[in-house]
Image (tube, rainbow, N blue to C red):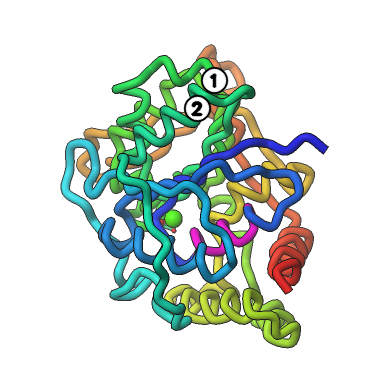
Amino acid sequence: MKKIPIIMDCDPGHDDAIALVLAFASEKLAVKAVTVTGGNQTLAKTLGNAKKVLSYIGKRPRLAAGADKPMFRELEVAEAVHGASGLDGPILPETDYKEEPVSAVDLMRRIILDSPEPITLVPTGPLTNLGILFTAYPEVKKNIARISLMGGGIESGNWSAAAEFNILVDPEAAEIVFTSGLPITMCPLDVSHKALMLPGDLEALRKHGGRVSVMVAELVEFFYQYHLAQGFAGAPLHDPCAVAWLIAPELFKTAEYHISIETQGKYTTGMTFADRRFWTDAKPNATVCLDIDRPGFIRLITEACRSYG
Ligand code: RIB
Ligand code: CA
């Protein structure tokens, strides 16, 4: 079966780590590179976390560090959610796995332009690396098939009442992405807040006992604490949604919306504004995931964990 060639752009981050586990386990995806951005924690921490997670699951893809701050703003991290390390919970071994001495943008550009078939980009953090890539090297767009991203919120935000973290950290980069003209699959909070890993699902991972299953259980256990305090019944696995849509789109219910990014609003900066008027002449620019078959999604995650032994 022909695999979809992808580049993961992430800010590990607990759910980014699980998205990496899912992507590398899938028979349907060929991960050509992993690029890292500041976001959940500083770039130094997210890069270190990416190296530890990838080494731990036995993968050493092409790897490059990207932006350490948004295009025009200061970096805001999510320490309350992901901890001081950005990946609190499991203790992962140190690794000698090294990133390449090029920027994420240069690595993405080389891989995209050299690829015999169009590449799918899977950003699961702030969109700074993509914003810089499309600005500096617009010619790459001709060999990009799709962007499948986690970000935004149609009904509400999580980092402000109006804005989701990935978009709020770098709204200008998000605007560049959503006006790129490229096909976009958007996995906003509307779907990721339904993509819950429940305590019972955690038990199943622990019962399996494989090293990756146990790592994921420890990641989710930590990640769940913040969300439990907010009243969630489980841990929302935001980033794996962007990977799962590529593997099993039938798990999702979607709508075609025109999404605009607010970059100026006193209360609404970072908002992903969907034009949902049925009479609108605004051409949709995103396939927006709004609902998910949660048990099917969890099955995908647990089968991926088991596949590592
Ligand atoms: O709002 C959720 C998103 O912000 C996820 O990508 C999480 O990893 C954080 O980056
Ligand atoms: Ca993320």
Q: Position of residue 259 (x, y in %)?
A: 47, 29
Residue 188, x across and y down, in percent: 52, 47
Q: Is residue 209 visible?
A: yes
**Residue 114 against residue 15 in the figure, above or below:** above
Residue farthest along the top direction in this orientation: 281
- Front residue of this view, candidates 151 and 212: 212
Q: Please give the residue where the numbered disc 1 appears in the rendered image.
A: 143
- Check the image and report above or below for 179 versus 161: above
Q: What span is colored magenta in the figure?
A: 15-23
Looking at the picture, does residue 98 appear above or below residue 306? above
Check contact, mark 1 vs mark 2: CB within 8 A: yes
Q: Is residue 247 magenta?
A: no
Residue occupying the point 51% across, 62% down: 54
Kind of element beneath mark 2: helix
Q: Is residue 199 left or right of residue 27?
A: left
- Residue most toward the front? 96
Q: Is residue 246 left or right of residue 217?
A: right
Q: Residue 22's quadrant in the figure?
A: bottom right
Is the residue marked by circle 1 packed among few (<14), some (14-19), or many (20+) residues within 10 Å?
A: some
Question: Residue 8, position in %: x, y?
Answer: 51, 46
Mark 1 / mark 2, whichever is N-terminal: 2
Residue 17 drawn in magenta? yes
Tell me what residue is drawn at x 42 percent, y 76 percent. Answer: 226
Q: Is residue 119 left or right of residue 160?
A: right
Q: Main secondary structure of the magenta part?
A: helix
Q: Secondary structure at mark 1?
A: helix
Residue to which mark 2 is pinned: 112
Q: Is residue 160 left or right of residue 145?
A: left
Disc 2 residue crowd, few under 14, some 14–19, many 20+, Cα 10 Å: many
Residue at left 35%, top 53%?
161
Identify which amino acid the numbered label 2 is placed on: Ile
